[in-house]
Image: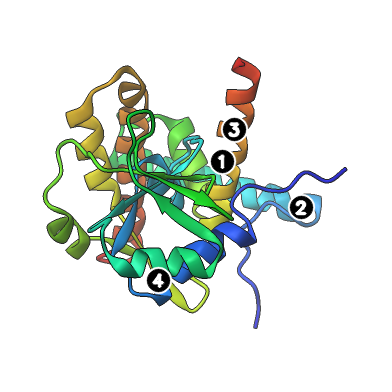
Amino acid sequence: MAVALPFAESEIRLLQSLLKFKVRFMVVGLSAATLQGAPVVTQDVGLWFEDLGDPRLVEALGTVGAAYAPPSPVNPPMLAGAGSELFDIVFKLDGLDSFAEEFKGCVSIPLGRQRLKVLPLERILASKLAANRPKDKLTIPILRDVIATAESLARKTGDSK
Amino acid sequence: MKSPQTTNQGSPPQAQAWARRLGLKVADVLSEYPDADPDNVRHTLILLEMPPLERLQRSLIRGRSAALRRK
């Protein structure tokens, strides 16, 4: 029996709905790093929203059969319903500026006809250095090497990024 | 439109040529960043040849299967 691939149609549809409704969010953490070429593994896709109380968020999620579940004594804030299982709402990021500041520096990754905002590698590294948990320490040297590789390639192609 | 020769798919000579090009690129990066780990550089260069969503999908597949094995 074929096993469904993670991050397929329903997850993409959810992200596209958020973009269509102009919800301000970005992909963060190791999922953001993998989108930019980092050879690391992750179990979920971290999303940082500017405002979890934004009514457009509820509308965008509702359109694809998902919902926002506010924090409870036992659960952090989370997404629930169709296509939401892989997403993790991130509400605390060490070592970073405000959402608005970080949003300005995001890289854009094509997602159909829309562009997904993704935290750049340098800022992912900054957050991992600040968090400094054992699991962060494992990825720091890899992120440094990915940044070095990207910088070297950019110089060769004359790309300023 | 001619597709770029970026992956290691195709005939054995093409695959060998791809591997040679990859090796040269790794050496190039290491000449600028001698402290970088060659494996990290090589894996990054390979991943950069894939579309971003495919990279994420591969990472999630590995991350989730590793988590299942730990249970």
Q: Secondary structure at mark 4?
A: helix
Where residue B9 appears, as percent x and y from the top left, is 73, 54
Task: Name which residue type carries label 3.
Answer: Arg
Q: Please provide percent x and percent y for residue A125.
A: 25, 38
Which chain is mark 4 on?
A
Provide the residue designation for mark 4.
A19
Disc number lying in front (1 or 4): 4
**Image quadrant occupied by the C terminus of chain A:** bottom left
Disc 2 and disc 3: Cα gap in Å? Answer: 35 Å
Q: Which is more N-terminal, label 3 or label 2? A: 2
Residue A140's image quarter?
top left
Instruction: Tell me residue A21's x, y (percent).
Output: 38, 75
Residue hosting label 1: B60
The answer to whether marks 1 and 3 mark residues whose Cβ atoms lie closer than 8 Å is: yes
Point out the tag, 1 or 2, that comes first from the N-terminus. 2
Say which amino acid is labelled 2: Pro
Q: Chain of mark 1?
A: B
Residue at the spot of label 3: B64
Alpha carbons under labels 2 and 4: distance apart: 44 Å
Q: CA distance from mark 1 to mark 3?
A: 6 Å
Residue bearing the label numbered 2:
B13
